[in-house]
Image (cartoon, helix red, strand yellow):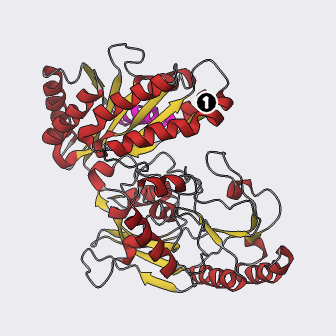
Amino acid sequence: MTTTTDLTPLLSALRHIVGDSYLLTEGDLTGYEQDWRKRTRGRALAVVRPGTTAEVSAVVKACVAAGVSLVPQGGNTGLVNGSTPDDSGRQVVLSLGRMAAIRAVDPDNLTVTVEAGCVLQVLQQAMEQQGFLFPLSLAAEGSCMIGGNLASNAGGTQVLRYGNARELCLGLEIVNAQGEVWDGLSGLRKDNTGYDLRNLFVGSEGTLGIITAATMKLFPLPAATLTAWAAVPSMEAAVTLLGLAQKHLGANLTGFEAMGQFALSLVGKHMPQLRVPFLGDADVPYCVLLENSDSESEEHARAQFERLLETAIEHGVVSDAVVAENIAQAQGLWHIRENIPMAQAEEGLNVKHDISVPVSKIAEFVSITDGLLREAIPGVRLVNFGHLGDGNLHYNVQAPAEGDIKAFLVEREHEINDIVYRSVASFDGSFSAEHGVGGMKVHELEQYESPTALAMMRAIKTALDPQNTMNPGRMLAA
């Protein structure tokens, strides 16, 4: 077996490829070695920061020759421990943050070609300045990067209208596990020439190759975007409201988020500067945040919203609602939703779940699973919120108010996961809706995916990465 000292030639080769300044082996590497949730910390042989696709290719070839595995990393904002090294001290973290250029915008084709290290919010703002909408939007958009968004097939708040990162991607540039470059950046919307390699790499979590650039869809900026906050008497009512919104607003419905009262109470407790509508109202167990993006005018959008809410109130689906009067009010409502995870973290350690079930079964799933958890763990607190419009809930579990929070996590996490994931499976759902598998949910994939599907996945991994160079132990068991 190769010893660590034998890897000195590799470090020299990497230094030659990217330069002294972009090979990190000493100092504080916490930002590269620790996961976003601060639950695990690995130890890297080195962090290498290439600036071009050619340098990525050379880095991969050097690591393959030395028999050293690579961990591709973007903004390191993932929630399933999929982009940090193990504790062996023998993995190289390949950070793409220097490759942040917007290479080209094609206005007639409504596409943008962008490098993997471009921060999502930077791309959003740059496209808005040119009169376009890039609709991928999620809480970490100020830190996450396009390559990681694609590698994890990120979702977010506008999947209902525009789809996941996969649906927004028309082409990729890839460095494969042998260090060869595949240029598939054409912005074609129709291309049936062989296997769909693009979609094979989207969502592969860095286990098959490294995404270095992508061609993404753009959309015209809407003429108006309005936001409403509705109080609903039950999760069943929230689902009914979704149907009414789809009927009244059609494709203009770009966001539909459901939030439980306890989740909102944490925002009110830890972030009192955010004024949460209907907070503490015992008759409002859930609230819904709706977004209506209209191509005509603000007047048309507001009239649509008013008709929808009037109908919903008449049918007892909504008890009360507010419509934002301006951009600042709309942003304030969205800040409440986006700060639920932060407020939950302020409350203490918790067990997170990123699950999806068919929209038609969400209400029953929540009712049954809430009951199972409360029966198993008296006093448990449920932080339920998420993208109801596409069937994705962040169904999180907070410790009882009294007791040792750290002990709760250690002693109860496995039991809680088992209850939740078994319930999800019984409703034909998925234990990972948008966060991926990473290293945290490998066991769940083995347990809940079919043997046939797992065999095909392993065959793909073996064919494309026979030396297991790319992010080993992630997604598939080693």
Q: Residue at x 62, y 17 (%)?
A: 402
Q: Is residue 253 above or below residue 167?
A: above
The furthest residue to the front: 451
Please state the horizontal and vertical placement of residue 226, each as a whole percent of the image: 28, 38
Number of numbered callouts drawn: 1
In this picture, residue 166 sits left or right of residue 294? right
Dominant secondary structure of the magenta stretch? helix
In this picture, residue 115 sits left or right of residue 260? right
Per the image, the residue denoted by label 1 is 346
* Occupied quadrant, residue 56: bottom right
Q: Residue at x 52, y 48 (%)?
A: 140
**Residue 393 is at least partly visible in this image:** no
Q: Is residue 340 magenta?
A: yes
Q: Residue at x 38, y 74 (%)?
A: 198
Kind of residue at disc 1:
Glu
Chain part drawn in magenta: 326-341
Q: Is residue 130 above or below residue 2?
A: above
- Of 266 and 54, nearer the camera is 266
Dot 1 falls on a residue whose secondary structure is helix
**Residue 400 is at least partly visible in this image:** yes
- Of 121 and 372, nearer the camera is 372
Q: Is residue 118 above or below residue 346?
A: below
* Occupied quadrant, residue 95: bottom right
